[in-house]
Amino acid sequence: MSQALTLARPYARAAHAAARDEGRVDAWSQALGFAAQVAADPRVSGLLLNPALERGQAVALLAPQGAEASFTRFLGLLADAGRLPLLAEVAGMFEQLRAEDQRVVRATVTSAAELSPQELDKLRDALKRRFGREVELETAVDASLIGGAVIDAGDVVIDGSLKGKLGRLQTALAG
């Protein structure tokens, strides 16, 4: 996976720079998300590796209807370099660059039970104070946490789950 990220990084940066220069970052984000989703389909991913697939066919398959000409040229560049299978990584890195530009922190909150909108608002406000940025939250439920939640905000992971606390207690008692 790290090799795929290393290969995808220059393409994500180039896509972000082009989108920013055009003032079309949101449009590129949507188009890349669409292309990555199509490329991830098992029927399509096998096709992308077929040497008989021509550049124009690949671009037509992956580009959303009405995509910018610069975006379709970008897909063509990926096709020429044999990098279309990296679209998911390119899209993910593009979103990270976009979030940095927009000063937004994306965090995933995994809790033992569904959180109420009020709890999410309090959590968002606390994270906003901690990071000094806007916060976009995604939620997930994992009953194995027993209680509490785990917040994953990229480089920062806050484990406030009962499962995590029990694990740390077990390590402290064993060591």
Image (tube, rainbow, N blue to C red):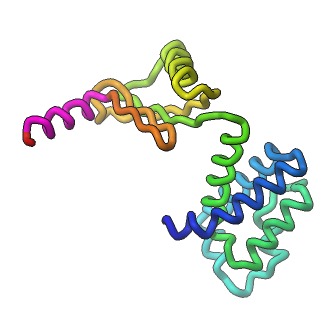
Q: Main secondary structure of the magenta part?
A: helix
Please name whichever residue, 130 or 168, is drawn nearer the observer in this view of the structure.
130
Q: Is residue 113 above or below residue 46?
A: above
Residue 7: image location, x then y, percent: 61, 70
Taking the image as shown, residue 49 lies to the left or right of residue 59, namely left
Q: Is residue 12 above or below residue 121?
A: below
Q: Residue at x 34, y 24 (%)?
A: 148
Q: Residue at x 37, y 35 (%)?
A: 142
Q: Is residue 47 above or below residue 19?
A: below
Q: Residue at x 58, y 36 (%)?
A: 106
Taking the image as shown, residue 120 lies to the left or right of residue 61, namely left
26 in magenta: no
Residue 46: image location, x then y, percent: 61, 75
Image label count: 0
Q: Residue at x 30, y 33 (%)?
A: 145
Please name whichever residue, 2 or 52, is drawn nearer the observer in this view of the structure.
2
Residue furthest to the bottom: 52
Residue furthest to the top: 118
Question: Residue 72: which quarter of the image?
Answer: bottom right
Residue 100: image location, x then y, percent: 67, 41
Quadrant of the snapshot with the C terminus: top left
172 in magenta: yes
Residue 150: image location, x then y, percent: 39, 33
Question: Residue 174: which quarter of the image?
Answer: top left
Question: Residue 167: which quarter of the image?
Answer: top left
Q: Is residue 85 above or below residue 95?
A: below
Taking the image as shown, residue 174 lies to the left or right of residue 97, namely left
The range drawn in magenta is 161-173
Taking the image as shown, residue 21 lies to the left or right of residue 98, namely right
